[in-house]
Structure formats: C-alpha cells, structure tokens
C-alpha cells in the first residue's frame, strides 16, 4: 500500500523539487549575468570618465602652457640683455599677473618662470623665486625646447590629481627659459561620493606603468610601497587603450571590472569590485526564489496529499478487499460507498463481482461435492458387485475339479474384472488429480524388487501373446530409496500394460539405470526408467495429444485394442507430482520407448540385498489362526459369503453380522481378535459403529479394518479419524486380505 502511495506522490514531489531547483538555479544565473552586465556597464562608464577626464586635463594644460609662454608678461622678463637682470618693475608686473591667473583658475597651484639655467626668476609663489629647478626632468625637457608633462600624482589627503607641465619660452633667439605650471586637477577619482552597485562599492583605481597605485580606495596601496604591482599592470594593460573586461586577484581577493590604458601617460585605469560582493545580490535572489519555491512545494504537496488521501484510502480499501478475496476470505463485505466518481463505480462493481464469484464458488464447491459423492457412490455400486464377481471367481478357481475349459472361462472373467477395476481406479485417480488431492508418500522401498513385482503381474499376459518381458536393472545402480513405491508401480503398470497391448511380436523391456546427466546432491540419486516395446509405434503428429485424457493416437486403436486413454494421462500426472516428466520416442511400425526420471532419496538404513519381505508364508492356510475370532460386518449377503470363504482356510472362527448396530452389540457381548467393518451399511454405518466400539472399555485395542467400496482418500481419512486401524478396498484381493491378517493377527 505504501509503495503505491509513494509511486503516486513521489513523481509529483520529485518533479516539483527538480523544477524548484532548476528555477532557483536559472534565476541565480540570470540575476548573476544581469548583475555582471550592469556592474561592467557602470565600471566601463566610470573608467572611461576617468580616462577622458585625464585626457581633457592634459589637453587643457597643454593649451594653457602654449598660450602663457607667448604672453608679453612672460616674454618681457627676457627682454633684458644677456647678463642683465630684468627690471624690478617688469618682475612685479609679471608676478602680479601670475597671481591673478592663479586666483582665476582654481586648478593652478603654482606658476614658475625659470631662466635657461633653471633658476626661478618669477612665480605666483615668491617662495620659489631664486630656487633652482635645473634638476627637474620636465624643466630640462622644456629648456631643450619641448613641451612636456612632468610627474603626476594623486594626493593622499586631497585625492586631487596633480600634474606638472613645462614649456619653453622662445624669444626668437632660441629658448631663453621655461614656464612651469603645477596643476591640482579636480578629483578624477572621488571616494567620498560613493557610486555603488547593489550596496557594494565599485571603485576606480589608477596604476602607473612602474606598478605604483596612484589612486585606490585603500590607502595602504598608494604611493611607493614595498610591493610594486608591475605584474598586475602587465596583465591588465593588455586591454590597451580601447579597454576591456578584466578579472584579477589582489591580496587573496578576486576582483572583476573594466580597465583601460590612458593614452598620454599610459596609466592603467580600472574600475572594479570584489567578485563575491558583486554577485551577493544574485545569490540572495536565487536563495529567495528557492525558499519561496520550497514553501510553495510544501504547500502544494500538503494540498495534493490531503486531497489524494481520500482517493488513495478508497483505493487501498479496495486493494485490501481484493487481497482478502484472493486469499479465499469472502466473509468481509465492503462498506457502502457514497462516491459517485470512477472509484465509486469500481467499489460497487467489485462488490457485485465478488458476490457473483462467491455464488459461483459455492455452486462449484457444491458441484465438486456432488461429483465426489457421485464418484464415491458409483465406485461403491460398481465395486460391490465386482467384489462378488472377483471373489466368486477366486473361490471357484480354488476348486481342483474344474475342467480346463471352465478354468479358462473363469480366468477370462477374472481378467475382465481386473480391467474393470483398473478403469474405476483410473477414473478416481484422474478426479483426484484434477481436484489437486492426489498426493505421494515417502516410505522406504526397493526399486529393483518393485520392478520385478510389476513384471510378475504382466508375465501371464506376455506369455499368452508369445512376447518376451524382461527387466534390465543397472548392476551398479542403488536399489533402496525413499519414495512412493505404489505410485511408481502404478506408472510402470500403465506403461507396461500399454506396451504389451500394442505389441504383437518381439517383446517389452523395462530398463532402470542412474541418469548420470542429472545433477544430484549427497544422499540423492536420479533414476531413469525406460519401457521399450517392438509394437506398432506412434505417428509424429499424434505425439502432441498422447497425454491428453480420453485420447489415443488413432481412433481405430480403440476399436482394435480397446482402452480409455487415461493411463498415460495419469502416469504423466503422477510422475509430475514426483518431480519428473514422461517422454516418448517412437517410430511407426518399429516400436516406442516411454521414459521418465525421478529424483529419489537414498535409503542408507538397509543394504540393497536386504530381504524386503516380512514373511515367507504367502497363503492364508499357513497363517495358523485357529482359536482367533473375526467379526465380519457386511450387509451384502454375497460379499459376506465371499469373505467367509476367503477366511475359512485360516482356521479362525468367523462371525458375520448385517449392520453396524449388530457389530457394536456383538463386540460389547463377545471377545473378538479382529473386526472387518464395511463402511456403508443400513441401520448404522461402519464409521458410527467404530465410534461406538471405541467407546467400549473392552474394545480399546481391538483392530478394526475398513472393508469398503469407497476408494477415495477422504473416506480413508474419515475411517482413521473415527478409530479404524487399516483399510481394505473392494473388491478384496486375497493378497491384501493376507497382508491384513498377518499384520493384525500374526505379527501384532
């Protein structure tokens, strides 16, 4: 039940879970890509802004230098003759002019005018006047006639971008001096006004080709440090002046952003952020989707399970009911259902179906009981007169004054009676097989002796037809086994009887040998039995129907040889019960071989050559029962007479009674050594009479043997259940009667 519930709900839960994870993953990846695109767009804009600002500042500074070196205020300082100092008035005018320029431009920190020796002769800041700047590279380049930019830096405190520019002052006679402007440009990188992306700062940094950070939000990276980052510059500067996306690692942190090389000073400008922080929002968004989806999943599963439970409970109730019905329990009834859907229809239909099946089963059981009763009655009704025929024939054959012709007639009557008895037994066995009531025993027996006894039964038939009947038992094969000798004998009887029936010349051979191709364990053996004849054989197209009941290979066979076709069917069923199968090979006109193999347990308690008999005396006359008293309870006068005649030679006193009531009364009043009790009698049957006798104190250990025409196993079981000790089936065979007398009156 639980597995079905799991099979119904698990796919939905699993599918929803996969969808949830997929949706969360897709949302995370989509958000990550969107965040990355937005961050890179911002980084590119900030980087381009910084690079553009630097380029613009350099261009404006270059223009200012070119204009100022040609200004009269500067040129007039160099109008004096060589070796003469400029007049003080001009110096003051120029100084005042420089101060005005400084005041008018907030980005200019200082303006210096130096002579060709690098000595400052005028400045907006009088502190520079008289100082030599000849050692400055940008001053030397300017005195050599080149406009250039000197050192650039970013203030640690002001964060302002400072650049020194210098240009030559050409009076027409060559470079007379140089003009130097110290610019404090506005904050290209402003860390005070944070531009953030998802609450995480995306900052701009500047790195010189020498590997020195000129701008970074962390001050520990700025200026000359022990850790120059030339390798980092080399890696990132590959994006060139066109710029590009970069990812780099700095002190254990991974950054992602946009970088570009400034064209004038070759500084690297990179705007980036810590990767984990940049994508944190995407992760949070994915987790949020996952949590929401999981909550939705739980709610959906709860709703589905709750609504499905009603359906599943009804379904499981039907399944449980079906299991009970399959197990044979028809007592449980389904409670009425008020469902109008398909389950309700199934509920009502199943209940109706089971009621119909129950009715059919009762009818089938009743029909089975009627059939069993019919078979039992038919067996009784046929066996009762057959007992008279067989018994009278046996008694007549004991008469030594019979003529040869009379003895021949009696032999034929006895053979006919035996055939009729065999037919009755076959019909009863087939009925048991179909009802699944046929069982096999496990008792010690000698297979070789069993085969010899079976052949003895058929020797007279073989002799009368002039056929050779022989047994070939493998010399090295074991002989004693544990199995069912009666059923094995029945199979061999059927196969040998058929072989003799369909053989007109030659002979029939029974071979027994170990099947060495079969696997056996310790204490077990597989014995193969073959019955080979030289008879008419069987056509190949008839082999398929050979083992069907009431079937023979050719309808003309029945007319010529007789038979019902039950023997092979019963033999196949019996061998199958014992774990084997009957097979056949045949050539029309040459003969047939019927074979079967049985897996038998070895009987190691007795040697193979042990005597299987219990008494060498084989006749009733030799039992020596004089002084014994035998009560015969039999309602049929003929059968009563036959039993008396059969028992007469043993010397025992025979007391006949006509019903069970008389038998019980006789036992209560007299002493008896054995009771032969018919099971079906008027007034009181044998079962009830046995119960009454067992209730008597004087008859606690008195042997009671059932003598009846009912040959069904259940009849035997009923007899044993009420206190009977043994069983004789009509018609009573002298050998069986001899066995009963020996067991209960001689050996007991």
Image (cartoon, helix red, strand yellow):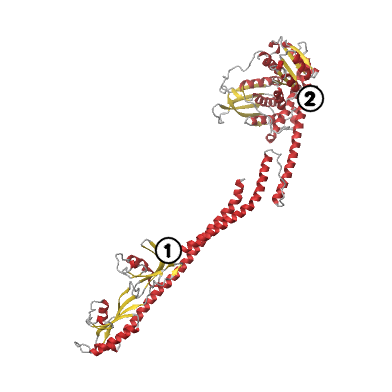
Indicate the position of residue 558 as horizontal and vertical percent values: 75, 29
Indicate the position of residue 388 as horizontal and vertical percent values: 78, 19
- The vertical placement of 190 against 286, above or below, is below
Q: Judge left or right: residue 284 versus residue 706.
A: left
Indicate the position of residue 187 as horizontal and vertical percent values: 37, 75
Image quadrant where residue 393 sits: top right
- The vertical placement of 371 against 670, above or below, is below
Task: Tell me, yes or no, whether the two marked residues, 2 and 1, touch with CB atoms within 8 Å.
Answer: no
Pointer 2: what residue? 381
Q: Quadrant of the N terminus?
A: top right
Mark 1 surroundings: few (<14), some (14-19) or many (≥20) residues within 10 A? some
Q: Nearer the viewer, mark 2 or mark 1?
A: 1
Q: Please report whichever mark, 2 or 1, sits nearer to the chain's N-terminal start.
A: 1
Of residues 488 and 265, the one drawn nearer to the viewer in this rendering = 265
CA gap, disc 2 and disc 1: 105 Å
Determine whether the residue tagged by mark 2 lies in a helix, strand or loop.
helix
Residue at the outermost top position: 626
Mark on residue 275? 1
Q: Judge left or right: residue 417 versus residue 90.
A: right
- The vertical placement of 544 against 733, above or below, is below
Q: Is residue 397 visible?
A: no
Q: Judge left or right: residue 423 versus residue 521.
A: right
Of residues 501 and 402, the one drawn nearer to the viewer in this rendering = 402
Q: Quadrant of the C terminus?
A: top right
């Amino acid at each position: 039940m639980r597995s079905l519930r799991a099979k119904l709900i698990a796919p939905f839960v699993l599918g929803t879970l996969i969808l949830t994870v997929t949706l969360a993953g897709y949302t995370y990846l989509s958000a990550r890509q969107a965040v990355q695109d937005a961050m890179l767009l911002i980084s590119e804009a900030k980087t381009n802004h910084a690079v553009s600002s630097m380029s613009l500042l350099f261009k404006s500074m270059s223009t200012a230098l070119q204009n100022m070196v040609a200004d009269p205020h500067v040129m007039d300082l160099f109008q004096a003759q060589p070796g003469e100092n400029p007049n003080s008035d001009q110096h003051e005018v120029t100084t005042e002019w420089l101060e005005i320029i400084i005041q008018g431009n907030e980005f200019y920190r200082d303006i210096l005018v130096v002579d060709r020796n690098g000595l400052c002769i005028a400045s907006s800041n009088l502190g520079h006047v008289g100082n030599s700047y000849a050692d400055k590279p940008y001053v030397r380049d300017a005195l050599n006639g080149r406009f250039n930019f000197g050192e650039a830096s970013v203030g640690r405190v002001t964060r302002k971008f400072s650049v020194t520019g210098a240009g030559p002052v050409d009076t027409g006679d060559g470079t007379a001096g140089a003009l130097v402007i110290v610019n404090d440009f506005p904050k290209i990188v402003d860390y005070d006004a944070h531009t953030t992306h998802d609450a995480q700062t995306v900052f701009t940094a500047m790195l010189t080709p020498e590997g020195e950070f000129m701008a970074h939000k962390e001050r520990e990276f700025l200026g000359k440090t022990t850790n120059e980052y030339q390798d980092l510059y080399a890696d990132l500067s590959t994006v060139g002046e066109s710029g590009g996306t970069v990812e780099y690692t700095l002190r254990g942190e991974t950054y992602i952003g946009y970088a570009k090389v400034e064209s004038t000073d070759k500084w690297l400008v990179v705007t980036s952020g810590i990767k984990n922080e940049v994508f944190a929002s995407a992760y949070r968004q994915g987790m949020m989707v996952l949590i929401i989806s999981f909550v939705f999943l739980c709610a959906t599963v709860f709703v589905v399970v709750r609504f499905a439970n009603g359906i599943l409970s009804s379904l499981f109730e039907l399944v449980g009911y079906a299991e009970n019905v399959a197990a044979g329990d028809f007592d449980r009834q389904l409670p009425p259902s008020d469902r109008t859907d398909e389950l309700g229809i199934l509920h009502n239909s199943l209940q109706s179906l089971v009621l119909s099946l129950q009715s059919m089963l009762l009818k089938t059981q009743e029909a089975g009981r009627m059939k069993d009763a019919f078979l039992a009655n038919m067996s009784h009704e046929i066996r009762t007169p057959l007992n008279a025929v067989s018994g009278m024939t046996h008694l007549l054959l004991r008469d030594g004054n019979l003529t040869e012709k009379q003895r021949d007639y009696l032999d034929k009557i006895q053979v006919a009676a035996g055939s009729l008895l065999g037919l009755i037994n076959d019909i009863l066995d087939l009925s048991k097989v179909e009802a699944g009531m046929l069982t096999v025993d496990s008792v010690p027996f000698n297979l070789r002796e069993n085969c010899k006894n079976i052949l003895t039964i058929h020797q007279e038939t073989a002799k009368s037809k002039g056929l050779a009947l022989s047994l070939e038992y493998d010399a090295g094969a074991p002989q004693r086994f544990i199995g069912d000798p009666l059923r094995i004998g029945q199979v061999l009887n059927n196969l040998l009887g058929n072989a003799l029936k369909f053989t007109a010349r030659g002979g029939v051979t029974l071979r027994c040998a170990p099947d060495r191709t079969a696997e056996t364990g310790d204490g077990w053996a597989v014995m193969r039995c073959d019955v080979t004849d030289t008879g008419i054989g069987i056509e190949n197209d008839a082999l398929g129907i050979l083992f069907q009941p009431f079937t023979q290979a050719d309808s003309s066979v029945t007319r010529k040889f007789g038979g019902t076709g039950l023997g092979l069917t019963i033999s196949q069923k019996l061998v199958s019960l014992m774990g084997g199968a009957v097979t056949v090979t045949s050539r029309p006109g040459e003969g047939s071989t019927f074979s079967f193999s049985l897996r038998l347990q070895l009987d190691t308690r007795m040697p193979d050559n042990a005597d299987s008999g219990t008494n060498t005396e084989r006749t009733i006359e030799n039992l020596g029962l004089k002084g014994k008293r035998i009560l015969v309870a039999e309602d049929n006068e003929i059968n009563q007479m036959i039993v008396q005649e059969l028992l007469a030679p043993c010397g025992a006193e025979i007391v006949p009674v006509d019903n069970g009531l008389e038998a019980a009364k006789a036992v209560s009043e007299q002493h008896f050594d054995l009771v032969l009790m018919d099971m079906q009698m008027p007034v009181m049957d044998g079962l009830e009479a046995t119960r009454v006798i067992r209730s008597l104190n004087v008859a606690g250990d008195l042997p009671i043997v059932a003598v009846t025409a009912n040959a069904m196993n259940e009849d035997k079981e009923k007899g044993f259940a009420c206190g009977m000790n043994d069983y004789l089936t009509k018609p009573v065979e002298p050998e069986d009667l001899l066995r009963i007398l020996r067991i209960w009156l001689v050996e007991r």
